[in-house]
Amino acid sequence: MHMLDLAAYTGPLLIVALLAVVALLVSLRDQEHAAPRLVSRAVWCPRHKRMTVVEFNERVQTGMAFRSARNCPLRKPGEKCGEGCAVQATQWP
């Protein structure tokens, strides 16, 4: 009779455990996003094949940095920077 009682509670116990895991994951996420900040980084520009210092608007969300170029001395008016320009140069090509 004990085995039959445990089998009856297995489904609800699994649902409660799943809800607890989901609640834990939700509580671990970023509650607030940092305000964007202005940073300068030395980057390699693949389009112009040279290095330059670019000013970025940078925001950090969930541990990842998202950058958009604000001022680049190599960029012509109306020209957009490619994604490769957002990667900081750690080694010169």
Image (cartoon, grey):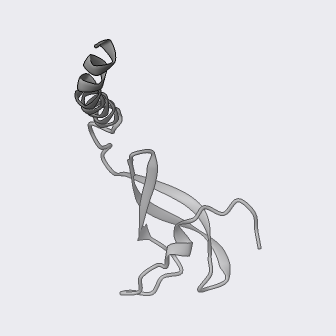
In the orientation shown, which residue stands out farthest toward the front?
Answer: 1
Asked if residue 21 is positioned above or below residue 60 in the image, the reply reads above
Q: Position of residue 63 (x, y in %)?
A: 45, 45
Quadrant in the picture for residue 22: top left
Q: Residue at x 41, y 86 (%)?
A: 79
How many marks do you count on the picture? Answer: 0
Q: Nearer the viewer, residue 44 or 4?
A: 4
Q: Image point 46% across, 78% down: which residue?
A: 81
Q: Is residue 19 above or below residue 53?
A: above
Locate residue 28 relative to residue 39 in the image: left or right. Answer: left
In x, y percent, where is residue 5? Answer: 25, 17
Split into 4 quadrants, where in the image is the N terminus? top left
Q: In this rendering, is residue 52 above or below 80?
A: above
Residue 93: percent from left, percent from top: 77, 73
Q: Residue at x 28, y 21 (%)?
A: 4
In the foreground, 91 or 77: 91
**Residue farthest to the top?**
2
Relative height, residue 46 to residue 69 (above, below): below
Q: Say whether residue 24 is left or right of residue 87.
A: left
